Amino acid sequence: MKDVKIITIDNRGRIVLPLVTRKNLGLTTNSQLMLVSDSETKEIRITPIGLKDEGNLVKLKIIMKDIPGALAKLVDIFADEGLSLVYSEAVIIEKDVKAVWTAISETPKNIDTLRNILIEKGEALKVDVFPLD
């Protein structure tokens, strides 16, 4: 069931989620939400997530070959490493040549090891890792 409400941003940039929305989604105090904003489409998406420690997240920007199955190989590596993906978006930069995959994931035990596996076994050309702000 969809629930549509008009909400207002206060002078400190805060919004209040209506009680009915919180109840319908099972949100309580300290529930974690992921906010994705798209400046091109002027859209905001807020999604509940069930992680215990938000400080354990990292953002990866992976430049990869734009060939069939490349993204699947990279995702399989995350699964093999036991890493959950919280968010993922892939965009073709140059058709049949290069794409970029942005992923938010749990922080791996060893980032350098994950980077090497993504390049050696996946189709990654470059892997940049950023702390999640």
Image (tube, rainbow, N blue to C red):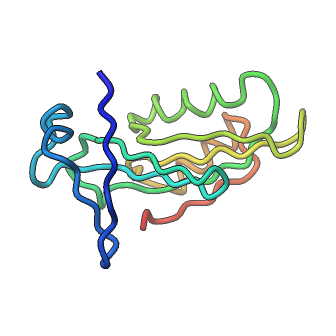
- The quadrant where residue 73 appears: top right
Side of 21 relative to 49 (left or right) = left
On the image, which quarter does residue 67 sit in? Answer: top right
Camera-side residue: 120 or 6? 6
Left/right of residue 92 with respect to residue 53 in the rendered view = right
Q: Quadrant of residue 42?
A: bottom right
Residue at the outermost bottom position? 11
Q: Looking at the picture, does residue 120 appear above or below residue 7?
A: above
- Residue at 16%, 42% in the rendered image: 27
Residue 13 in the image: above or below residue 81: below
Who is closer to the viewer here, 46 or 97?
46
At a point 34% along the width and 49% down the height, the residue shown is: 6
Q: Position of residue 133 (x, y in %)?
A: 42, 68
Residue 54 image point, x, y percent: 28, 56
Vertical arrangement, residue 70 with respect to residue 117, above or below: above
Between 78 and 133, the residue placed more toward the observer is 133
In the displayed structure image, the side of residue 72 where residue 31 appears, left or right: left
Percent position of residue 110, x then y: 44, 54
Q: Residue furthest left?
A: 29
Count of numbered labels shown in the rendering: 0
Residue drawn at x 63%, y 50% is 41
Between residues 45 and 18, which one lies in front from this camera angle? 18
On the rendered structure, is 63 left or right of 6? right
Q: Considering the image in quadrants, where does the N terminus appear?
A: top left
